[in-house]
Amino acid sequence: MSTDPLFAPIPGADHRDIGGIELDIFPTGAARVKRMIYPPGFRWSTQMKPVAKTEFCMHAHVGFLARGQIRVLFSDGCTEDYTAPCVLAVPPGHDTWVVGDEACVFIEFDFEKDTVQRLGLPEGHHHG
């Protein structure tokens, strides 16, 4: 078991395990703050696609990658790599997986289904 405090249980969290993701959720006003732990080998299209029942993840993700590495594949075929520590904003329409053998810890801020609108994010991936 890790002694890293980023992996420690969080008192008062709404704790869930969904598709192999350890998820701790905290309501904060109109938003939520979530700590998500993605294990090595996690891939959205393998573990979450059967749960979400969509071809790609259609949720926007905004937050801080505190540990690990991820790769994002957008529905248009583009990929982006993220290595902790970094801030990221991923629009809907993507597949994501953990790169390497270290678990990823992502601290996310969202407004559930209103995240795109409330944070002014694009509806999908666009080339800058």
Image (spheres, grey):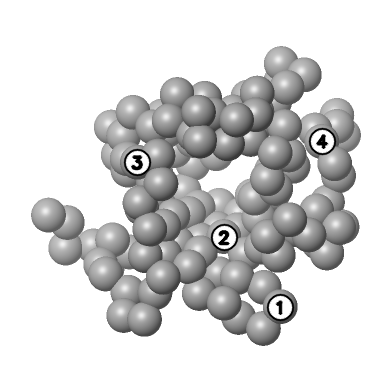
Residue beneath disc 4: 124
- Tag 3's secondary structure? loop
- Tag 1's secondary structure? loop
Mark 4 burial class by Cα count in 10 Å: few <14, some 14-19, many 20+: some
Q: What is the C-alpha distance between the residues marked 4 and 3?
A: 25 Å
Residue beneath disc 3: 20
Residue for point 65% across, 29% down:
54
Q: Quadrant of the C terminus?
A: top right
- Tag 4's secondary structure? loop
Q: From the top left corner, tell me how far across and down residue 112 is, in percent.
A: 68, 60
Q: Is residue 67 above or below residue 96?
A: below
Residue 45 is labelled as: none
Question: Which one is earlier in the sequence, the residue at label 2 or at label 3?
Answer: 3
Q: Is residue 40 above or below residue 75?
A: below
Question: Which one is earlier in the sequence, the residue at label 4 or at label 3?
Answer: 3
Q: Quadrant of residue 80?
A: top right
Residue beneath disc 2: 108
Question: Which one is earlier in the sequence, the residue at label 3 or at label 1?
Answer: 3
Q: What is the C-alpha distance between the residues marked 4 and 2?
A: 18 Å
Left or right, 86 with respect to 17, comes to: right
- What is the three-letter code of the residue carrying label 3? Gly
Q: What is the C-alpha distance between the residues marked 3 and 1?
A: 27 Å
Residue situated in front as seen by the camera: 109 or 24: 24
Residue for point 85% across, 41% down:
123
Given this view, does label 2 or label 3 mark the residue nearer the observer?
3
Residue 30 is labelled as: 1
Given this view, does label 1 or label 2 mark the residue nearer the observer?
1
Q: From the top left corner, tell me how far across and down residue 27 is, in percent.
A: 57, 77
Q: What is the C-alpha distance between the residues marked 1 and 2?
A: 14 Å
